Amino acid sequence: MNINEEKPSLKDRSDIDDFLVYLKVERGLAANTVISYRRDLEKMASYIHAQGEELRKARTVTLLAYFHELAREGLRPASIARAQAATRSFYHFLCQEGRVKENPAMELVRPKGAQRLPRSLGQDEVAVLIEQICGSSPADLRDRAMLELIYACGLRVSELVGLNLGDVHLEERYVRCLGKGGRERIVPLGEQAAAALQRYLKGGRGKLLRNRREQGLFLNQRGRRLTRQGFWLLLKKYVQKARLPARVSPHTLRHSFATHLLENGADLRTVQELLGHRDISTTQIYTQVTVNRLIEVYRRSHPHGQE
């Protein structure tokens, strides 16, 4: 069967588009990787559609048959592994978004190799990034508050831009946010983030609001809720000013939040709760990050640490 003979449905294409925006904005994946994932997923969607199914209702047996077909056609193992990675990530996204109840890609064999560790910034690098915003304009006050908050609370960018005025409790020092799957969690608010939010609410938000009725906490220049893409562009600008690695993304700040907590003595269960991870195995990847840093510091600092 020619895998490309059927066109994906509009719903399938919409799900793929949303997933790719998530990869670019929240995960900070390179443009070439996003393009490759699109190609892989659209090809898979065409095959699934040819079997009379849609992506949201695809069966595990159909996915297994698809990858068997790719191997039979002679596709390189590395390309098949990438397509499987795209498929697993895609269905994990659909599950987290509540678009599917069960993940049909769970039984796909994960290729052998070391687990990819999340990128994070050092504590000094985060400080340098945030200090790039020192103005007093409404936009500056907003941007400073957003960077302080996403790092202080370990928020996903979708959670950050989804905050409403009533979700922030400055006196009690906590933020209420809705995570993936509509799960609510309460995250403590640190002093620096609280102060930055106070300045934004007093001197920034009202001027950006422009007499509109908008419950969103963070607003764009037209008085509407700032989008994920809008925040990503702002972050990119400040990353360049701070001369940090170009691939710093909103998710990098979330990874940094978790890594820095563990480096400073927080226990894994607490970090799991703060991040909103349903399964602690998702959080355990950060223990490897901190171990790697300990080894690096030891080798750099101990007289017998260098080979």
Image (tube, rainbow, N blue to C red):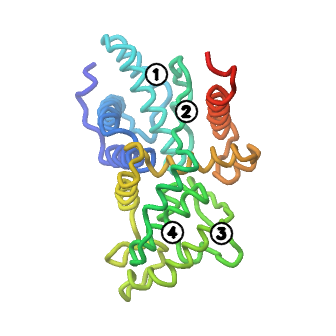
Residue 280 shows in the view: yes
**Label located before the other in sequence (4 or 1):** 1
Q: Residue 180 versus residue 296: which sits nearer the camera?
A: 296
Which quadrant would the N terminus be assigned to in this image?
Answer: top left
Q: Which of disc 3 and disc 1 is earlier in sequence?
A: 1
At label 1, the amino acid type is: Leu
Which residue appears at 69% of the width and 43% of the height? Answer: 263
Q: Residue at x 35, y 57 (%)?
A: 237
Instruction: Tell me which amino acid carries mark 4.
Output: Ala
Q: Which residue is mark 4?
A: 145
Q: Secondary structure at mark 2?
A: loop
**Alpha carbons under labels 3 and 2: distance apart:** 30 Å
Q: Quadrant of residue 167?
A: bottom right
Q: Which residue is mark 2?
A: 117
- Residue type at mark 3: give it: Glu
Question: Rounded to the nearest whole Å, what is the CA distance between mark 4 and mark 1?
Answer: 46 Å
What is the C-alpha distance between the residues marked 3 and 4? Answer: 12 Å
What residue is pinned by disc 1? 64
Question: Compared with residue 300, is residue 245 higher up or lower down, i.e. above or below?
Answer: below
Q: Secondary structure at mark 3?
A: helix
Instruction: Mark 4: give few (<14), some (14-19) or many (20+) Cα within 10 Å.
Output: many
Q: Secondary structure at mark 1?
A: helix
